[in-house]
Amino acid sequence: MHYADVPAQINIRHAEIDDLDALEHLENATFSYNRLSRRSLRYYVTGKTATVLVAMQGGKLVAYGLVSFRKNSPIARLYSLAVAHAASGLGLGRRLLAECEQTAIARGARAMQLEVREDNAAAIRLYQAMGYREYERVEEFYEDDSTAICFEKDLP
Ligand SMILES: CC(C)(COP(=O)(O)OP(=O)(O)OC[C@H]1O[C@@H](n2cnc3c(N)ncnc32)[C@H](O)[C@@H]1OP(=O)(O)O)[C@@H](O)C(=O)NCCC(=O)NCCS
């Protein structure tokens, strides 16, 4: 599979088991709630139920996106998307999300769904800018009881 360079020196590729340390570090640095454990990250990186993409800059893992799939379901789920603070605001979230969508299309998905905390303004703006529309709100979704907004986008 071919992945574009984003921006010039950033390369997006599939995650490998050797990325686990860096993935765990990024997860802990970017999320303060509902973090994925190392065990879960390993499960997704090595298993067939998900695709994990990582963005590398100068040998450093600076972002990742995780798309999960359910058997016989045409709906893919963006389970996680995170960009390191040092690399944020450069368009990487947008490009990584686009690559996640391409991955979902390649696996036969017809739509992508995701949940985002209602106070996560940056992520909500990103999803809206990328064509996602809100279809539901779920109270007490996160471990601190905050509300999730559920977004969906039809994939071509
Ligand atoms: C949300 C996140 C992935 C965005 O990544 P990013 O690489 O900084 O985003 P981009 O540079 O691609 O920006 C794309 C769009 O997102 C929105 N956005 C990004 N950062 C924003 C901010 N601080 N405030 C408001 N909107 C923001 C904007 O609409 C932006 O488009 P624009 O630059 O044309 O205005 C990143 O901030 C992050 O990892 N946050 C912590 C983890 C997280 O919350 N993940 C989402 C869980 S659902």
Image (tube, grey):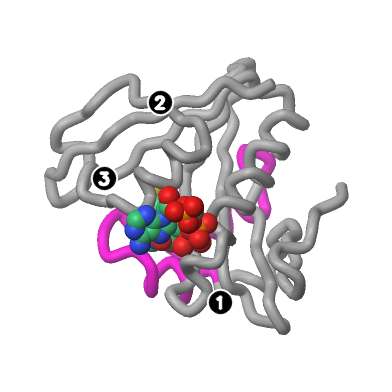
Circle 2 Cα neighbour tier, 10 Å, few/some/many (<14 / 14–19 / ≥20): some
Q: Are marks 1 and 2 in contact (CB under 8 Å)?
A: no
Mark number for residue 133? 2
Q: Nearer the viewer, mark 3 or mark 2?
A: 2
Q: Amino acid at mark 3?
A: Arg
**Which portion, as a residue range, is magenta?**
23-50
Q: Nearer the viewer, residue 123 or 104?
A: 123
The circle drawn on residue 44 is none
* Residue at 63%, 19% in the rendered image: 110
Q: Which residue is mark 3?
A: 117
Q: Residues within 10 Å of mark 3 (few under 14, many from 20)?
A: some
Question: Magenta stretch mostly in which secondary structure?
Answer: helix
Assess whether mark 1 and mark 3 are in contact (beta carbons under 8 angstroms): no
Callout 1, which amino acid? Asp
Residue drawn at x 38%, y 50% is 123
**Element assignment for label 2:** strand
Marks 3/2: CA–CA distance: 15 Å
Where's residue 21, x and y in %? 56, 76
- Label 1 vs label 2: CA separation? 34 Å
Location of residue 28 with respect to 69 vertically, above or below: below
Pick the front one: 108 or 41? 108
Marks 3 and 2, the one that precedes in the sequence:
3
Against 110, residue 112 (above or below) is: below
The residue under label 1 is 21
SS under mark 3: strand
Q: Residue at x 56, y 76 (%)?
A: 22
Looking at the image, can residue 18 be seen? yes
